[in-house]
């Protein structure tokens, strides 16, 4: 790759260089380790991007679409984390916590925690925004689902199962569960506990304090990546195929000190399945982190 800019810019491009690779056509096997590659500050007060809360890779632009829960706007973030750009507003949106792209249906989905709603934005007609109230979906669900979620619904992350088209949400905690919605967002298809039995456990964190704050679908492995803020970890989970694998989210600061990521809010995998990105909400210290998936 020819680079005509600075050495630092070239190094950043090298770290994220696999981002535009195609989705794997067959299972590439379970990950065995995450290798920290780099991180960049992304707090952007001038763009009102102050509380990063979710990201998803956009194959059309080869950048990320990101949100911040202090504003009703959405943004693009360059793959190397160097630039945040305001690209639009979603009327009436409050407290956005998750964002995903439904490529097959040509739509962007933004999840509001406080409103317990999903905003659907068609990519070809972004002015035609639709809001889906999830509380109504819960009201029409089974007694068991209503008893589980009513009054304790705090959705924190959203993704699309590219195999089935289902929309997947994670509820933060109490209960810490994965909720599967029909593609048209009208029915709850399943609710699965993100329990210790399913591998969602961190020894240093009490069970009732462990949360989940974001997720992304891994098309090459037909699995999920789920991030935990309080657990400072990422979980890799093949639903129905045993417990999740846990990876500590370790990184090195500018001084070379080894740290755990604080306040991790969003997680995204590149199409090749070999780079994992984490975004955190840490005020002016908010960063984008990148890991190689081995």
Image (tube, rainbow, N blue to C red):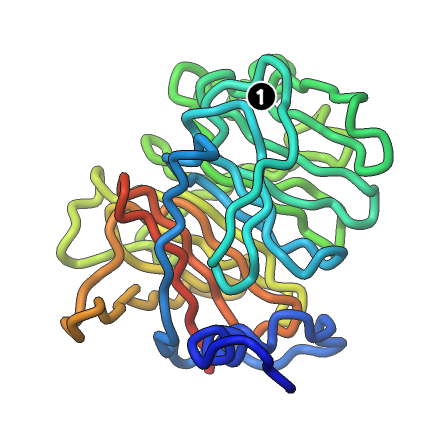
Residue name at image x 60 percent, y 56 percent: 217
Instruction: Work out which residue is located at the far right of the displayed protein and give it.
Output: 124
In-front residue for pair 193/86:
86
Q: Position of 143 compared to 167: left or right?
A: left
7 to 276, vertically: above or below: below
**Total number of numbered discs in the rendering:** 1
Q: Position of 227 compared to 102: left or right?
A: left
What x and y, as percent, mark residue 201? 27, 55
What x and y, as percent, mark residue 33? 38, 79
Residue name at image x 79 percent, y 22 percent: 127
What x and y, as percent, mark residue 62? 67, 61
Residue name at image x 68 percent, y 51 percent: 161
Q: Which structural element holds mark 1?
A: strand
Q: Which residue is mark 1?
A: 117
In-front residue for pair 81/241:
81
Q: Position of 287 compared to 138: left or right?
A: left
71 to 60, vertically: above or below: above
- Mark 1 burial class by Cα count in 10 Å: few <14, some 14-19, many 20+: many
In-front residue for pair 177/279:
279
Answer with the quarter of the image where residue 134 lies. top right
In-front residue for pair 147/63:
63
């Amino acid at each position: 790759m020819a680079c005509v800019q600075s050495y630092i810019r070239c190094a950043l491009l090298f770290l994220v260089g696999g981002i535009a690779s195609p989705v794997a056509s067959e299972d590439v096997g379970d990950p065995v380790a995450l290798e920290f590659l780099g991180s960049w500050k992304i707090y952007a007060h001038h763009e009102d991007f102050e509380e990063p809360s979710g990201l998803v890779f956009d194959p059309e632009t080869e950048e990320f679409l990101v949100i911040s829960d202090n504003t009703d706007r959405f943004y693009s973030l360059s793959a190397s984390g160097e630039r945040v750009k305001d690209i639009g507003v979603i009327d009436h949106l409050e407290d956005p916590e998750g964002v995903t792209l439904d490529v097959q249906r040509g739509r962007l989905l933004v999840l509001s925690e406080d409103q317990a709603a999903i905003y659907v934005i068609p990519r070809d007609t972004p002015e035609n925004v639709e809001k889906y109230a999830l509380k109504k979906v819960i009201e029409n669900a089974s007694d068991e689902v209503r008893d589980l979620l009513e009054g304790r619904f705090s959705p924190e992350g959203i993704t699309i199962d590219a195999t089935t088209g289902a929309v997947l949400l994670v509820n933060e905690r109490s209960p810490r569960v994965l909720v599967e919605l029909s593609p048209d967002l009208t029915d709850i298809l399943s609710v699965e506990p993100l329990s210790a039995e399913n591998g969602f456990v961190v020894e240093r964190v009490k069970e009732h304090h462990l949360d989940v704050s974001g997720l992304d679908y891994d098309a090459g492995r037909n699995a999920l990546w789920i991030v935990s803020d309080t657990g400072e970890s990422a979980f890799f989970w093949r639903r129905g195929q045993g417990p999740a694998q846990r990876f500590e989210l370790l990184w090195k600061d500018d001084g070379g000190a080894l740290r755990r990521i604080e306040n991790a809010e969003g997680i995204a995998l590149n199409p090749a399945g070999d780079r994992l990105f984490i975004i955190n909400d840490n005020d002016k210290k908010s960063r984008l982190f990148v890991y190689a998936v081995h």
